Image (cartoon, rainbow, N blue to C red):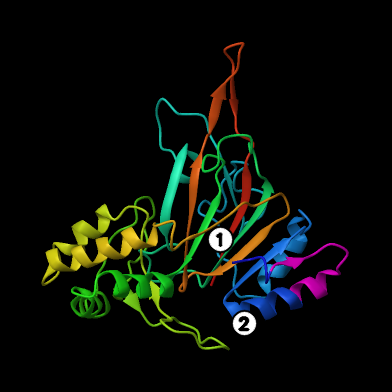
Amino acid sequence: MFDSSAIDCSGRAPEEIEEAALASVAEHRLAYLRNFPIDVDQYIGLLSRLGELCPNYAAGSTKDLYTLHEAINIVRCRAPQAAGPERVQEKAGSLPMHSGRSFARRRPLFLAMLMTDPGWQDLEPGSNGESLIVRWGDVLAEVRRRHPEHWAEDLRLLTSRAMSFPASHLDEEPSLVPFLYVPGTPRYTPVADDVAVRLPQDIGRLRMAAESLDDGERWFEAVTRFQQVANDPAVTHRYVMNAGDVVVIDNDRYGHGRQHVVAARTGADGGQTVNPRAIWSVNIQ
């Protein structure tokens, strides 16, 4: 997916990198940059060209995960915790395909991730935290192909039923748009099945939302079919991010996820080592 459109930043001036990234976003609604400097000011300068940078989830916190910049959320691994809350991104395991802040009325238009440390890459394929991306339009087309007997009713329900569900950890006004809706920005180059999707990591929250909908059980069946296809390796794209890799995606049109990651392991001496993997994540409105 990225091989033909990746932008090599080696030896390029910041202004040249920004123009190339903006052109890629305009054409493809995503950009993939390699060998980008791991530099806060240059990263923020690039992303500021795309829109308003959202404060990180704990802006003002004194924790080092949030103090690098008010817009940067550092996603790291943590050893298993005996007590207290854990962010799902920090824990061992995989992350299913999802859209950013799918619950919220004010959602990011773009998501950006800069890999600053890829962490352990010596495990079996599929266990190194490989990144995943899918175009929602590709999922929609595949659902139509696989389930022709359900297709018309699935589409009607997923585009016509306004639904709301709360965040798992944030107190924000929820969105009321349907599961499938028209993207908020036009594409320079039209493509088939150009749709936006509100898919959380945990579709159990959508099961609860279904309780308040007419035909809620049937609606949730349609959601489940869509979610299963979205996580099928035949539809998704897998890629390995190295240090200095940046991905920018249109949060309306693309879902993202992660294959299994090992957060910590025990050495021969019995001591525990945490995976040094780290990503600078930014939401842009």
Q: Which mark is residue 32?
A: none
In the displayed structure image, the side of residue 179 where residue 258 appears, left or right: right
Residue 141 forms part of the magenta stretch: no
Q: Position of residue 58 (x, y in %)?
A: 52, 51
In the displayed structure image, the side of residue 257 where residue 17 appears, left or right: right
Q: Residues within 10 Å of mark 1 (few under 14, many from 20)?
A: some
When the figure is inspected, residue 91 is found, relative to residue 152, above or below; the finding is: above
Q: Which mark is residue 26?
A: 2
Q: Position of residue 223 (x, y in %)?
A: 26, 65
Q: Residue at x 34, y 56 (%)?
A: 167
Instruction: Find the residue positioned furthest to the top.
Output: 269
Residue 13 forms part of the magenta stretch: yes
Q: Is residue 49 or residue 2 the one in the foreground?
A: 2
Residue 212: tell me if it is visible: no
Report how far apart the C-alphas of labels 1 and 2 lie in the structure. 24 Å
Sequence-earlier tag: 1 or 2: 2
Q: Locate residue 81: give its quadrant.
A: top left
Q: Between label 1 and label 2, give the one nearer the viewer.
A: 2
Which stretch did the figure color magenta? Answer: 6-18
When the figure is inspected, residue 107 is found, relative to residue 122, above or below; the finding is: below
Residue type, numbered disc 2? Ala
In the displayed structure image, the side of residue 107 where residue 115 appears, left or right: right
Q: Locate residue 70: give its quadrant.
A: bottom right
Q: Residue at x 40, y 78 (%)?
A: 195
Q: Residues within 10 Å of mark 2 (few under 14, many from 20)?
A: some
Q: Residue at x 32, y 61 (%)?
A: 227
Instruction: Find the residue positioned furthest to the right.
Output: 11
Say which element carries label 2: helix
The residue carrying mark 1 is 55
